[in-house]
Image: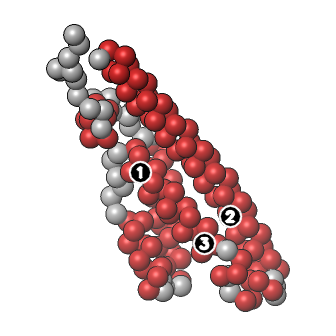
Amino acid sequence: EMTTEGLVPITRDYLARYYDKYPLPPIPDGVTALAARLRALSAELAAASPFSPEEEHLEQEASVVPAHKIDENMWKNREQMEEILFLLNKSRRPVALQQKSTPEDAEIVSTLDDCETKLKEMLKKLEQFQLKNADNVFNTGSHSFLLLTLLL
């Protein structure tokens, strides 16, 4: 007769503790430099055009320490991408930009459109990655359950 003695349920917490034993390699220096450059550009933009109350909330969100668990980080990234795409939507742009009144406005619109396209592509890839991982976790859980059922 088989027993379940010594078996533990494979929960999210169990997997998190397991993967804590396998830390990721450090982020390359280039990423740190790029992040600092982006922060500096953001500060310049904020000085030239102060944040609205909604934008202040986004700025506070962006400045918090990132989650150290990969799944939390991915969900936060996905949430932020969706929020940025919402804000980049053509209908939310200033009227002057929508009408492309000047060559400078047309250039800004082109840049915003490029950003929106790239962000949509990244979001789609992230969603596909999350779906694939969810399927893998589900299948692993199903296989574990099936194996336990066969053993008992």
Q: Using the image, tell me which numbered label, if any, was put on residue 116.
A: 2
Dividing the picture into quarters, in which one does residue 118 lie? Answer: bottom right
Q: Type of residue at label 1? A: Asn
Residue drawn at the location 33% of the way across and 58% of the way down: 65
26, above or below 64, in the image: above
Relative to 124, is 111 on the left or the right?
right
Say whether disc 3 or disc 2 marks the residue closer to the N-terminus: 3
* Residue, disc 1: 73
Closer to the camera: disc 3 or disc 2?
3
* Residue, disc 3: 86
Per the image, label 3 sits on a secondary structure element best described as helix
Residue 94's spot in the image, x, y percent? 68, 86
Q: Type of residue at label 3? A: Phe
Answer yes or no: is residue 20 visible. Answer: no
The N terminus sits in image quarter: top left
Q: CA distance from mark 3 to mark 1?
A: 20 Å
